[in-house]
Image: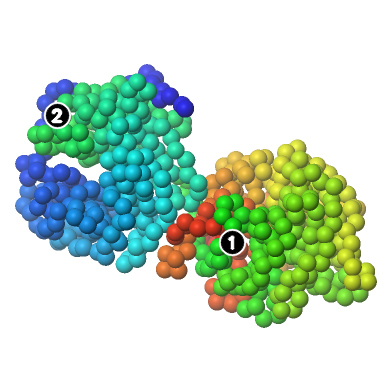
């Protein structure tokens, strides 16, 4: 566990301005004093929550509108003059969203969320990078849920396990950080972004483990930090998030004199608003911390998704696309590392399952001239016995096992196929120790064979690879280092050359790879698409030297279709073929590491290449 850090620079940069907290501060307007929670609105008005309900006041203190209801747990998001508020109806605990028309002085209720299935102790809003609004609900026993809203839709994103006895939560949208105060213990920070496993950090703990006396109470998000009242509401603690760590400032006495759990905090510009026994007070705050923001990345929505895996956990891994004479009959092959090979149609419906063992990567080539005939083949790596598996695909898209070949590798992993201009098909197979093997696949008397052509090695663990058949180039991903290229022609080997190292555009692990080239496109055109697993993004770069990076994107929610985004992607594949409708410019298939809306087994998402090309300004 990392301890919070105190440095002299923080003491100078983050402090309360004069008058000090020990000196009585100006009270807020009288009409706010009975409010249990409040928010300052654009133009100087106020939104308050008290025993009379949700009330809207203008800057002069005149009540303009009211929703009469017993309520608690108010949180807001303000964008210019547009204000969204959500509170809980006290009796039902049903979350109710409200829009505030500041200019007209009106409150308008929106479609409510469903009544929770557990007793809610804390709730808070989160606005994600896609500008979708989420609501966290946390129960006394640690049950928690994340919901998302768009228009009249209210969808459960995921269930979470959070600390018990949580009384307060707030989200730092820019940092995508959920902050939760556990009343008898301290403050924790979680990933607010639902895509991914998430992580937990300690912000502050109770004595003797940290500075907080009696645990944690109310909290408020500060730019690049958080303000926390201790459990007794006697002291205010400020914490700055710097260099991935939480830095603590000396606590300031406030002596709010309230019952445990009754204190509140809110930020109003350069002031902190504190609620105690005698109502609300505004305390001037000198805080020069900078708001944290995630790098701006274009977001596209998926068009469809496959049925979930029949196995829980890390199961789905790598897809491959097979094209039919009728574009609508195309098939998606996907590996299940705990079961075998699955086949899906363009609507994501599973059409076939081959329970052949723990398959990792798969690739497809079509119209291969072998043994005097043409054949469509899929090849996959089988981790049970470190073998290479062959499958035939008939004209109807039916897949059948066609052969297994030992490789002699110790930990077989990734693979990709190569279709030379001279004919035939070859397979690149890799091992976790960095070894690559290149095989030529033959067919004689209806029996397949595999002949080793060459071996080479990279320094650390690889997995994803793809070949540019038109230019006889192999691209491979060394997971922690970056993308390399070398000749795909075994008779003309050349040294590995770095294409794109792990860095600003590419975050380890480097995983799935695919090449997009327009039908009939010249060999010196095309894009390389790579899964940047560490930040759940995808990098698009030219498939030819100097390998210019064209942009990055993420896959977000498609709420009308009930489809979540993608995260921690292993494999992907792409086609430029016109598959009709949204896929007129081709389709990208992406493995999703964490299925949401709601939680479920992993699956694959279908993305229209035209959507990617549009957001990145590609030709």
Report if residue 358 is visible in the image: yes
In this picture, residue 399 sits left or right of residue 257: right
Tag count: 2
| Picture coordinates of residue 225, whole percent (x, y) | 35, 34
Q: In this view, does 172 lie above or below 65?
A: above
Mark 1 or 2 closer to N-term? 2
| Picture coordinates of residue 444, whole percent (x, y) | 93, 69
Residue where numbered disc 2 is placed? 257
Viewport quadrant of the C terminus? bottom right
Q: Is residue 279 above or below residue 396?
A: above
Residue where numbered disc 1 is placed? 310
Q: Which mark is residue 250?
A: none
Q: Is residue 416 above or below residue 223?
A: below
In this picture, residue 250 sits left or right of residue 340: left
| Quadrant of residue 400 within the rendered picture | bottom right
Label 2 secondary element:
loop
| Quadrant of residue 481 within the rendered picture | top right
Label 1 secondary element:
loop
In this picture, residue 329 sits left or right of residue 561: right
Looking at this view, is 440 or 408 the one in front?
A: 408
């Amino acid at each position: 566990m990392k301890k919070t850090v105190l440095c002299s620079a923080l003491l100078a940069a983050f402090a309360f301005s004069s008058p000090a907290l020990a000196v009585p501060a100006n009270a807020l307007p009288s009409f706010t004093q009975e409010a249990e929670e409040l928010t300052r609105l654009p133009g100087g008005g106020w939104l308050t929550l008290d025993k009379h309900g949700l009330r809207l006041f203008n800057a002069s203190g005149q009540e303009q509108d009211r929703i009469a209801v017993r309520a608690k747990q108010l949180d807001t998001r303000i964008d210019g003059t547009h204000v969204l508020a959500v509170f809980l109806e006290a009796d039902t605990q049903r979350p109710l969203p409200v829009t505030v028309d500041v200019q007209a002085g009106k409150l308008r209720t929106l479609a409510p969320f469903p009544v929770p299935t557990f007793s809610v102790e804390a709730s808070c809003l989160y606005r994600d990078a896609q500008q979708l609004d989420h609501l966290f609900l946390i129960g006394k026993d640690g049950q928690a849920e994340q919901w998302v809203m768009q228009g009249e839709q209210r969808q459960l994103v995921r269930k979470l396990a959070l600390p018990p006895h949580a009384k307060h939560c707030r989200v730092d949208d820019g940092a995508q950080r959920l902050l939760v105060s556990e009343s008898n213990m301290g403050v924790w920070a979680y990933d607010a972004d639902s895509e991914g496993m998430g992580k937990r950090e300690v912000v502050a703990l109770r004595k003797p483990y940290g500075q907080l006396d009696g645990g944690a109470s109310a909290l408020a998000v500060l730019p690049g930090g958080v303000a926390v009242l201790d459990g007794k509401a006697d002291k205010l603690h400020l914490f700055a998030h710097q260099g991935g760590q939480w830095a603590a400032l000396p606590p300031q006495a406030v002596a709010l004199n309230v019952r445990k759990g009754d204190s509140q905090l809110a930020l109003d510009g350069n002031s902190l608003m504190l609620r105690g026994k005698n109502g609300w007070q505004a305390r001037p705050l000198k805080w020069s911390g900078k708001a944290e923001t995630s790098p701006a990345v274009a977001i596209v929505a998926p068009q469809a998704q496959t049925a979930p895996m029949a196995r829980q956990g890390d199961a789905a891994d790598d897809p491959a696309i097979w094209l039919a004479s009728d574009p609508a009959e195309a098939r998606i092959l996907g590996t299940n590392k705990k079961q075998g090979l699955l086949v899906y149609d363009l609507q994501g419906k599973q059409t076939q399952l081959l329970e052949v063992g723990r398959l990792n990567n798969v690739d497809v080539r079509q119209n291969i001239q072998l043994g005097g005939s043409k054949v469509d083949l899929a090849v996959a790596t089988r981790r049970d016995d470190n073998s290479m598996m062959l499958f035939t695909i008939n004209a109807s898209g039916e897949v059948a096992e066609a052969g297994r070949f030992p490789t002699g590798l110790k930990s077989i992993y990734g693979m990709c196929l190569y279709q030379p201009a001279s004919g035939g098909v070859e397979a690149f197979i890799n091992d976790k120790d960095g070894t690559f093997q290149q095989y030529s696949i033959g067919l004689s008397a209806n029996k397949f064979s595999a002949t080793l052509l060459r071996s080479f090695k990279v320094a650390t663990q690889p997995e994803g690879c793809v070949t540019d058949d038109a230019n006889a180039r192999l691209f491979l991903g060394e997971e922690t280092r970056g993308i390399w290229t070398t000749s795909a022609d075994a008779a003309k080997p050349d040294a590995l050359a770095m294409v794109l190292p792990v860095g600003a555009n590419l975050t380890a692990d480097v995983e799935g790879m695919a090449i997009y080239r327009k039908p009939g496109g010249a060999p010196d055109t095309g894009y390389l698409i790579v899964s940047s697993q560490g930040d759940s993004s995808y990098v698009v770069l030219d498939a030819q030297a100097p390998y210019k990076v064209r942009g990055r994107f993420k896959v977000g929610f498609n709420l009308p279709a009930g489809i979540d985004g993608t995260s921690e992607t292993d494999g992907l594949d792409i086609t430029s073929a016109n598959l009709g409708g949204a896929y007129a410019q081709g389709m990208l298939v992406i493995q999703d590491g964490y299925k949401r809306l709601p939680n479920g087994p992993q699956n694959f998402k279908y993305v229209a290449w035209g959507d990617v090309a549009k957001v990145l300004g590609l030709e």
